[in-house]
Amino acid sequence: MNGRRLGVGIAGLGGAGARVLPALTGLEGVELVAAADIRPEARRHFEATHHGRAFPSVAAMCASSAIDVVYIATPSHLHCEHTIEATQAGKHVICEKPMAVNLGDCDRMITSALGQGVHLLQGHSKVLDTPVRAMRGVIASGVIGDVFHIDSWNFNDWIRRPRLAPELDSATGGGVVMRQGPAQVDIVRYLVDRPVISVRAVSGSRASGLATEGHYTALITFEGGATASLSFNGYGYFDIAEFTTQPDSLSPIPRPWPAGPVDSARKYHGQPDGDAAPRPAMPGLPFCGLTLVSCERGVMRQSGEGILVYTDKGPESIPLSPQSGRAAAFVELRDALNEGRPVFPDGVWGKATLAVCLAILESSRQGREIWLTDQRAGHEA
Ligand SMILES: NC(=O)c1ccc[n+]([C@@H]2O[C@H](COP(=O)([O-])OP(=O)(O)OC[C@H]3O[C@@H](n4cnc5c(N)ncnc54)[C@H](O)[C@@H]3O)[C@@H](O)[C@H]2O)c1
């Protein structure tokens, strides 16, 4: 880097891209220089509100020598194509979740980055969020012993937001297992810090007119015997923030049910990120549902201000500063480059998380436990 700032290009200016932009403000050593989107109105809005050029394709943006890193926030089924375009142009990549839509694509992305000697970082991972990091720190300290079980609950209105057809098909990265599952899976994999060995899950749809998963429940077993139980409900009646960061605010009246997939004009209706946005960002800490971590000598959970650790001495509050995974991914990449070390979480980690999400779908389809054999690599970092 020779001390110069890391030039960032954002691929995709929809919901995720719009949330990355503010995360870049004020980040030392990092500078937003460009974006790419196929929608002219998104490009116009970007150029009117940011110092930077907007390109009509990811390939055109990657030709710019001002860019060192590309943040991939295009639809999930394009992550592989766009990551390969960026890495082949010699750019580092931070890729939104899910990393891709199948494991073969993950392999191609990893191989391309490796071959070009650039970093591939799993972006927007909950393992970079301060509360998750703090919980892992408590586990690593040994004070409350090893993790033997984690309960992770998330309830939001994912299924009621306007969705393009690929967002409602798990084969193209749609549905809540592919779109929301990586967050819960990342958290439990990171906290248990052992390879996943099996998954038994049921997913289903209770949204009339939408043939996609809107809920799931999964039991994950890790090497050594620890377990995690994941529940997700995206039907919009209840928002889990009520149990976590916003205990004084009841869930809002849900949006109307969508009649089916919408087209791009309806999804964005001229706005940079349309109305697909989740509930307005909460002040304070990033979170992903309620995570209750059961250890041998205590229990932990996230609170509104940090984390709470419950032991024989009673609850202890550990306050934390708010930093989300979206900003932290840039910090991680910048620091890894300056220190000459690998990034974490990398493509191997992202692939292992995708494998668990695919196993949730497969277990539900087959009505049986799915055994995983390729989960060790992510834990060697
Ligand atoms: N919205 C979120 O807060 C959120 C949260 C977690 C993960 N993600 C992930 O981010 C990715 C994008 O999700 P989203 O909600 O922002 O979707 P979105 O549909 O709102 O945005 C995608 C953007 O990519 C653009 N695009 C489509 N094809 C393109 C191409 N070939 N070249 C350049 N731009 C192209 C679209 O015009 C759109 O602006 C997905 O992988 C999703 O899983 C999003």
Image (cartoon, rainbow, N blue to C red):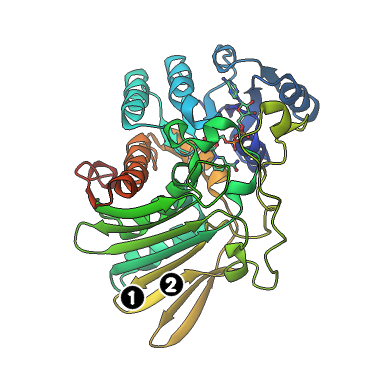
Query: Residue 75 placed where, x, y %?
Result: 54, 30
Q: Is 86 left or right of 136, judged from the image as shown?
A: right
Query: Looking at the rendered structure, which numbered label has been put on residue 144?
Result: 1
Local packing at callout 1 (Cα closer than 10 Å; few below 14, some 14-19, many 20+) is many
Q: Nearer the viewer, residue 351 or 264?
A: 264
What residue is drawn where x is 49% and y is 46%?
Answer: 176
Local packing at callout 2 (Cα closer than 10 Å; few below 14, some 14-19, many 20+) is many
N-terminal of the pair, mark 2 or mark 1, is 1
Q: Nearer the viewer, mark 2 or mark 1?
A: 2
Query: Residue 238 placed where, x, y %?
Result: 61, 63
Q: Mark 2–mark 1 contact, CB under 8 Å?
A: yes
Query: Looking at the rendered structure, which numbered label has been put on residue 300?
Result: 2
Q: Is mark 1 within 8 Å of ligand 1?
A: no
Label 1 SS = loop
Query: Residue 148 placed where, x, y %?
Result: 28, 69
Task: Tell me the kind of residue under disc 2.
Answer: Met
Query: Residue 127 placed where, x, y %?
Result: 44, 51
